[in-house]
Amino acid sequence: MTAIWIGVIGTSLIAFALKYLGHNVPEKYLKNERMLRINTLIPIVLLSALVAVQTVGDKSKLVIDQRLAGVAVACIALALKAPYFVVVVSAALTSAAIYNFG
Amino acid sequence: MNRATVTQSLSVSFTVGLYGTAFGAAGVAAGFSILQTCLLSLLTFSGASQFAVVGVMGAGGSALSGIATASLLGIRNGLYGLRMAPLLQVRGFKRVIAAQITIDESTGVAIGQEERGADAMKQGFWLTGFGVYFFWNLFTLAGALGAQAMGDPSAWGLDAAVPAAFLGLVWPRLHGKFERALAVSAVLLSLALTPFVAAGIPIIATTLLAVAFGWRARQ
C-alpha cells in the first residue's frame, strides 16, 4: 500500500473516531450544572476562534488582507440585522473586489 | 420546518460546499488520485483535516505526519459531539451518521438556532450536515476533475464568505456582555497562539476559556 493510501485511510479512521467519541461520552458526565454550562460555551469559543483564524491566519502567520475587509463588512451587515445570505454575500463581494481590483 | 433555519442551512451548505472545488484541485495537485481525493471528502469529511493531510503529504511529509496534523484539526469535531449528542438523542446507526456529519457547519447552524428552540436546532444540524456533505463531495469531484474554471477561491471572495458565514452563526449567541467577552477572548487567544503552535491547537486551546468562563454559575 502506498503512503498516500495510508494517509487517506488513517486520516479518515481517526477523523471518524474523534467525532464518534464525542457522541459517546456518557450523559451522566455532562448532566451536572458545571459541565452543562461549559458544554454550552464550547461551540461558541471554537467557532469564534475559527472565524479569527480563517480571517487573518495564513499557516503560522497573521496576515491582514481582503478577508478582513470582507468580514468587517459582514460585521456591519450583522449589526444592521441584515438577512443571513446578505451577510455572506456582502463579505464575498467586498473581499473579491479588493482581491481582483485592489 | 422553520424557513429561516432552512435558508441558513442551505446558505452555509452551498458556500462551504463551493470550497470543495479548491480541495479537489489541491488534492490532485498534491499527487493524490481523483479517487483518493474524493474518498477523503466522503470519509474524512472535515475540510481543515483534509487540506492538512494533502498539504503535508504534498510537500513531501510522511503519512504519519499528515495523519497527525489532520487529526489535531479533527479534535474539535469531538468537542462539538459533546454538545450535539444530548440535543440529538440518537442511537445505533443514526448516531454513526450524526457523528460523521458533526463538523463546524452543522454545529454552528444548530447553536445559531437556539432562540428558535430545540427542534429548529436539530433541523439545522441535520439539514446542514447533509447539505454540506452533498455539496462538499460534489464540488470536490468537480475540482479533482480539473474544474479550474472556478480557479482561485479568493477571486470569488470565498476566503471571506466562509468566516463570514461562521460569524453569522455565532452572532446571535453573543447577546450579553459575558458571551461577547468570551468570544473576544477566544479570538485573541487563538490569534496569539497561531505563530507559535501547530495548526489546530490555537482553536482547540480556546476550550480552556469555555472551562474558565463556565466554571462558576453567573449571578
Image (spheres, rainbow, N blue to C red):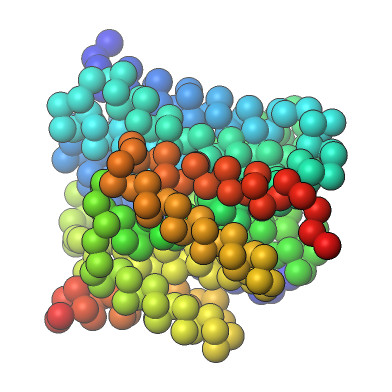
Count of marks overlaid on the render: 0
Instruction: Give the residue drawn at x 60%, y 68%.
Output: B180
Give the position of the N terminus of chain B as an image quadrant.
Answer: bottom right
Whether residue A29 sits left or right of residue B66 in the image: it is: right
Nearest to the observer: residue A16 or residue B151: A16
> Residue B120 lies in what quarter of the image?
bottom right
Residue found at x 30% / y 69%? A67
Q: Report if residue B106 is visible in the image.
A: no
Pick the residue in front: A3 or A57.
A57
Residue at the spot x=68%, y=39% of the render? B82
On screen, residue A56 versus residue B113, left or right, reads left
Q: Observer-nearest residue: B129 or B213?
A: B213
Splitting the image into 4 quarters, where does residue B122 fall?
Answer: bottom right
Viewer can see residue A93: yes
Instruction: Using the rendered view, name the quadrant where residue A74 is placed.
Output: bottom left
Q: Where residue B48 appears, x then y in whole percent?
A: 39, 43
What residue appears at the point 30 percent right and 41 percent down from the top-left corner?
B196
Q: Is residue B154 above or below residue B134?
A: below
Residue A48 at x, y = what percent? 51, 59
Quadrant occupied by the C terminus of chain B = bottom right
B186 vs B138, left or right, is right
